[in-house]
Image: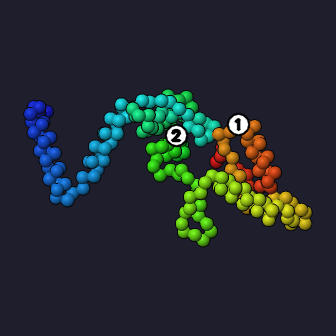
Amino acid sequence: MATSVTRRQFLKGSGATLAGGLTLSALGLDTKPAMAHVGDMDRMKKLREATQTTSICCYCSVGCGLICSTDKSGTVINIEGDPDHPVSEGTLCPKGANIMETTAANQHRLRDVLYRAPNSDTWEKKDWTWAVDKIARNIKKDRDAGFIRQNSQGQTVNRVDTIAFHGSSNVNSEECFMMVSMARALGMVYIDHQARV
């Protein structure tokens, strides 16, 4: 048998429930899940008021669709899969799902070159010129040390086993050909490609 509730009874019951919840909170019961739900409601309100723009994920050649939500100041506040995209239909891989971490919204993203010397426990800030020069010197040192060697048949082989190359699937065929040619010229034998992974 269904019973009807008047508006006044509903409001009284809601007020009693709220008062009971506050009392339980004062007694030491955990109200964090309820507060998290309130935070989610606030986030949903921001998303409803945001400007939505479609974009494409940059991480591989699939080009999954993204919906970027920006607030009134132009700051990205959310990125999610685009259900209207003909290829991905709203789904994203882990890299695409975490693309928000690459935006200015991530306060912890790296902005500077950080270097830790061997056997050190502290990081030093360096500039990009220093970093590129250091990488070039390390490649030359490894190449000079291991480029000319003998294989098991006594033949001279030119290769470097201490450096690997991992290509990007976000480049076209010509760029990929040039990068792999450069890696082969340096003597690298460990060559892989993001599209295969």
Residues packed near mark 2 inside 10 Å, few (<14), some (14 to 19) or many (20 plus): some
Q: Disc 2 vs disc 1: Cβ atoms closer than 8 Å?
A: no
33 relative to 160 in the view: left or right:
left
Kind of residue sitting beneath label 2 = Leu
Which disc is residue 196 wearing? none
Quadrant in the picture for residue 131:
bottom right
User: Mark 2 to mark 1: distance in Å?
Assistant: 22 Å
For the residue pair 63 and 133, the one nearer the viewer reads as 133
As drawn, is 57 to the left or to the right of 142? left
Q: Residue at x 75, y 37 (%)?
A: 174
Identity of the residue drawn at 48% across and 43% down: 104
The amino acid sitting under disc 1 is Asn
The residue where tag 1 is placed is 172
Residue at the image point whose x is 16% and y is 45% from the top: 18
Tell me the colour scheme of the image.
rainbow
Q: Position of residue 83 (x, y in %)?
A: 48, 31
Q: Is residue 136 above or below residue 75?
A: below
Q: Tag 2, which secondary structure?
A: loop
Q: Residue at x 86, y 60 (%)?
A: 157
Query: Which residue does the numbered mark 2 point to in the structure image?
Result: 92
Answer whether residue 161 is visible to the viewer in this image: no
- Residue 79, percent from left and from top: 46, 38
Question: Is residue 97 toward the left or the right of residue 5 in the image?
Answer: right
In-front residue for pair 96/104: 104
Determine whether the residue tagged by mark 1 lies in a helix, strand or loop. loop
Q: Is residue 134 visible?
A: yes
